[in-house]
Image: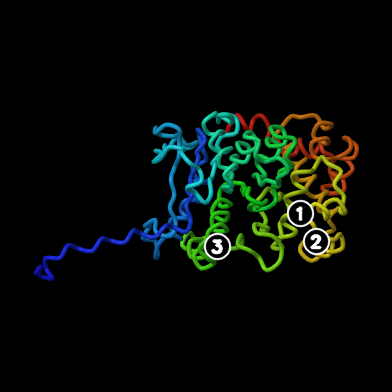
Amino acid sequence: MRQKDDMPPAPRAAPPRPALRVGFVLADRFTLGAFANFVDVLRLAADEADRSRPIRCAWSVLSDEIRPIRSSAGVAVHPDARFGDPARFDYVVVVGGLIDVFDLGAPAHLRFLRAAAAAGVPLVGLCTGALILQRAGLMEGRRCCVSWFHHRDFLESAPEVAPVADRLFVVDGDRLTCSGGVGAAHLAAHIVDRRLGRDAARKALHIMMLDDRGLEPARGAPGDAPQPGPVGALDSADPLVRRALTVMSQSLDADLDCAALAARLAVGRRTLERRFRSGLGLSPAAALVRLRLAHAERLLAETADPLARVAAEAGFSDAAHLSRAFLAAHGLRPGAWRAARRPAASDLAGA
């Protein structure tokens, strides 16, 4: 009879399947920060503390050929798997890059993304990854989030899609997009929150020294927290006012009255006016004039553009309109203000 010590060891149980599996598709010259922020949230949510074992989450960098993919920072990342069957992932994340150089139409990338969509796998676009999803024909009728910095670029590249540039991220069914940067971390935390729970999402963000404002709010939609943007001469602690200022900054040359602004932000006009008075001590109309003047000041100080062009770009009807607003704000007309701001030629020569 075989002794107990001679018995063969019992087979080890297979490790549990991770609750969240993510595949990354990186564009050439992809944005390293967006990728790193997203994957770091997965890493921190996957294990105890920051031990980094892929237990609750697993992730792979995918490609059609296993060769390094260069980021916009010059740092390369080596893929660890070929595209294969997209259904093995819970999410497929495409990371865009430099808008003027990356290939929007790499055939293998587009085929894989279309296959993922056909298989019902949710698709995530980070930074200009939303443009790649649009190029693959996968954003029709969807809202998408882009950086305020690339708002105009997106309008020119994909005029049929209305970009949202005043929020951290946008969830539209099984299409999730964000502006990049810390927005990528907040979008990753939103996904972790849905799959692993709020505690795991908060833990990851807090270890990264980020707040949890992008998680599901008591009211409103996930990602409703305002995207950091060029609010120029004005700022407010009120998130609704910050979002409104960002929209205004992107629409200086548009006829954006208070009713249209409130509709775009999905709030009532009176609510918007009340929050502006409380947060800034200004009406939305007065705040818009302030932003237009601040932009005109930058153009006058930094360019030699004629007043008519400065007025048009800053949202004034003509040079006379700009001149009246400048005189009321500064006691000087734009030409005199520009001359006073520029150093004398002798000062420049001695600098």
Provide the residue designation for mark 1. Answer: 244
Q: Earlier in the sequence, mark 3 or mark 2?
A: 3
* Disc 3 from disc 2: Cα separation: 32 Å
Q: Earlier in the sequence, mark 1 or mark 3?
A: 3
Q: Nearer the viewer, mark 1 or mark 3?
A: 3
Which residue appears at 84% of the width and 31% of the height?
308
Of 69 and 136, the residue lying toward us: 136
Provide the residue designation for mark 3. Answer: 193
Quarter the N terminus occupies: bottom left
Of 90 and 331, the residue lying toward us: 90
Q: Position of residue 317 (x, y in %)?
A: 89, 38
Q: Earlier in the sequence, mark 1 or mark 2?
A: 1
Q: Label 3: few (<14), some or many (≥20) within 10 Å?
A: some
Q: Is residue 348 above or below residue 216?
A: above
218 to the left or right of 95: right
Q: Which mark is residue 221?
A: none
Quarter the C terminus occupies: top right
* Disc 1 from disc 3: Cα separation: 28 Å
Q: Is residue 44 above or below residue 255?
A: below
* Secondary-structure class at tag 1: helix
Q: Nearer the viewer, mark 1 or mark 2?
A: 1
Q: Nearer the viewer, mark 3 or mark 2?
A: 3
- Amino acid type at mark 3: Asp
Residue contact at pointers 1 and 2, CB within 8 angstroms = yes
- Amino acid type at mark 2: Phe
84 to the left or right of 247: left
Provide the residue designation for mark 2. Answer: 276
Q: Position of residue 199 (x, y in %)?
A: 51, 68
Q: Position of residue 143 (x, y in %)?
A: 71, 46
